[in-house]
Amino acid sequence: MDEVIKAIKERRSIRKFKKEKPDKEVIDQIIEAGLYAPSGMNLQDTIIIEISDEKTREKFVKANRRIWGKENDVDPFYGAPIILVVLAQKGWRNADFDGSLVMGNLLLATHALGLGGIWINRAREEFEEEEFKDFLKDLGIEGEWQGIGHCAIGYIDGEMPKAPVIKENRVYYVD
């Protein structure tokens, strides 16, 4: 079976990570795969922010937990030591689509390189807040950006989940 098809079929969302951080070279490969995602009119109007700093990660944990409405002891990123935040140019009609393709590439590359990953929502709400708009400015990121998602990644703590049974009657052919 083709390796890409194999990765698509085997990739699962991981909800328990080891604290150990993957090597930067591996993270950079994952980020590069995200940058190769297709985009409307090839505008490439998405960006990725890699968060591995504990203090910054905790800022995202607290905001994500608050937006989600969860207790203080819940880690919405399941202990993943690396968070890749995907943002798209605000106002671009393909922002959600382009950003989702980046997220898909990140998750597939993560799996293909032997790590686990999961898409975590609430980035849209985070980046509507002044604190996170200021965060972007502090990084030197200009313009208006909307959050698409967080790709939480790291080493899997436990077994790889099994693929679910694929539901029937989801494909229709018009020959």
Image (tube, rainbow, N blue to C red):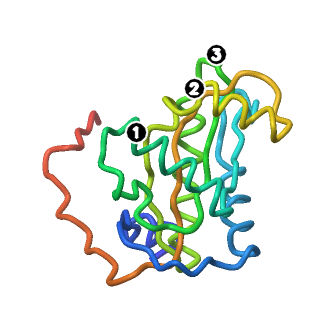
Helix, strand or loop at label 2? It is loop
Residue bearing mark 2? 129
> Is residue 101 left or right of 32 when viewed as pictured?
left
Identified at 70% across, 79% down, the residue is: 23
Q: Quadrant of residue 98?
A: top right
Helix, strand or loop at label 3? It is loop
Identified at 51% across, 42% down, the residue is: 149
The mark closer to the camera, 3 or 2, is 2
Residue 91 shows which numbered tag? 3
Q: Residue 135 in the image: x percent, y percent?
A: 72, 37
Question: Which of disc 2 and disc 1 is earlier in sequence?
Answer: 1
The amino acid sitting under disc 3 is: Gly
In this view of the protein, which residue sits in the foreground, 145 or 54?
Answer: 54
Identified at 51% across, 31% down, the residue is: 124
Identified at 53% across, 72% down, the residue is: 154
The amino acid sitting under disc 1 is: Arg
* Distance between the alpha carbons at the discs numbered 1 and 2: 12 Å
Q: Residue 110 in the image: x percent, y percent?
A: 55, 68
